[in-house]
Amino acid sequence: MTSMEPFRDEARSRDLPQEEVERWLTTVRRCAMLSPVGQAPGGPVAGRLGGLPPMPEGEPVPDLPFLASVDLAAIPPGTTDLPLPTEGTLLFFADTEDPWGDDDWSRLVYVPPGTPVSERGPDGDWPPTVHPAQDLRLTTEPSLPNRGSDTEEFPHGGELGSVWWKTCDQMQPGGPVQIGGYPWVWNADPVTEHDHGPGDWVLLAEIGGEDLTEGDLGVVYWVIRRDDLAARRFTRVRACYDMVG
């Protein structure tokens, strides 16, 4: 995984306690970053941005913009700390024009391995936007909270979050699709600051990018309980949306 020296250097320049910095770095979580081919040379193709969704035969296509697909078989075990299926495909849909109006603005479809599929759009007179198709390559990257809080364990947690905010571009190239890890938070943390109910909630996916979502740097997050993910209960996923402002 990428060296964390840029983080250490910035923390040192702020005179943050070295022992606390090293403890903070033990909380690094690995994530699967999926980036367009030109941004992640050499990595395996593990998904696709846009295009038409490869939907199971006989299943209606959600009447929502299709954002991305992720090939779970292309993500090696241990790339994240999530209990991901080792096979199958995840299809992510979201209409971020009004994500606060109702619960029908997003959808996640899990396609089990071996399921016959066909690429097609939804029926209807007003089809949703079809984003240009781009293959996405996989890299394994570190992630840390970009917004921290001062706690008994981490008295400088807020400042350490700021350090990641400033230096992450040097250690994590970023991409429109992230699987696992910590969310990039503009306002409210989708895992800890929403009332999802009891359980060990984790970030399954984060998707955003220019012309992909509405708003200023808009991001869609899908969160799920860890035990539901292990059992492939994808209908229990929750979606949240955030943007600058």
Image (cartoon, grey):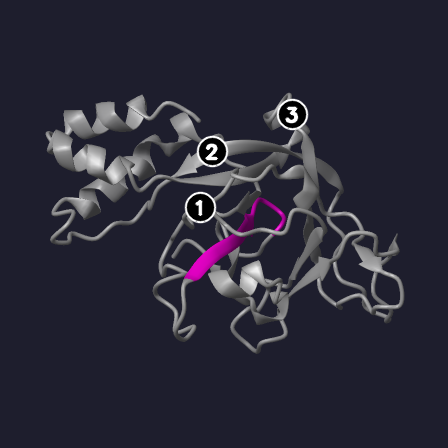
Circles 1, 2 touching at the beta carbon (< 8 Å): yes
Kindly report the distance in space between the C-alpha atoms of the residues bearing marks 1 and 2.
9 Å
Q: Is residue 112 visible?
A: yes
The residue singled out by tag 1 in the image is 181
Residue 181 sits above or below residue 102 on the image: above
User: Which circle's residue, 1 or 2, is located before the other in the chain?
Assistant: 2
Q: Pinpoint residue 69: horizontal percent, then vertical percent.
A: 70, 49
Q: Residue at x 48, y 60 (%)?
A: 226
In magenta segment, residue 96: no
The residue singled out by tag 2 in the image is 141
Q: Pinpoint residue 108: horizontal percent, then vertical percent.
A: 65, 62
Kindly report the distance in space between the C-alpha atoms of the residues bearing marks 2 and 3.
17 Å
Mark 1 crowd level (few <14, some 14–19, many ≥20, 10 Å Cα): many
The residue singled out by tag 3 in the image is 38
Residue 77 sits above or below residue 238 on the image: above
In magenta segment, residue 207: yes
Element type where label 1 sits in the image: loop
Seen from the viewer's position, the closer of residues 123 and 222 is: 222
Amino acid type for the residue under numbered disc 3: Gly
Front: mark 2 or 3: 2
Residue stretch in magenta: 201-212
Amino acid type for the residue under numbered disc 1: Gly
Seen from the viewer's position, the closer of residues 124 and 135 is: 135
For the C terminus, the image quarter is: bottom left
Q: Pinpoint residue 75: horizontal percent, then vertical percent.
A: 62, 39
Principal secondary structure, stretch drawn in magenta: strand
Seen from the viewer's position, the closer of residues 66 and 213 is: 66
Question: Which image quadrant for residue 91?
Answer: bottom right
Amino acid type for the residue under numbered disc 2: Glu
In the image, taking residue 54 as reference, residue 218 lies left or right, namely left
Residue 136 sits above or below residue 114 on the image: above
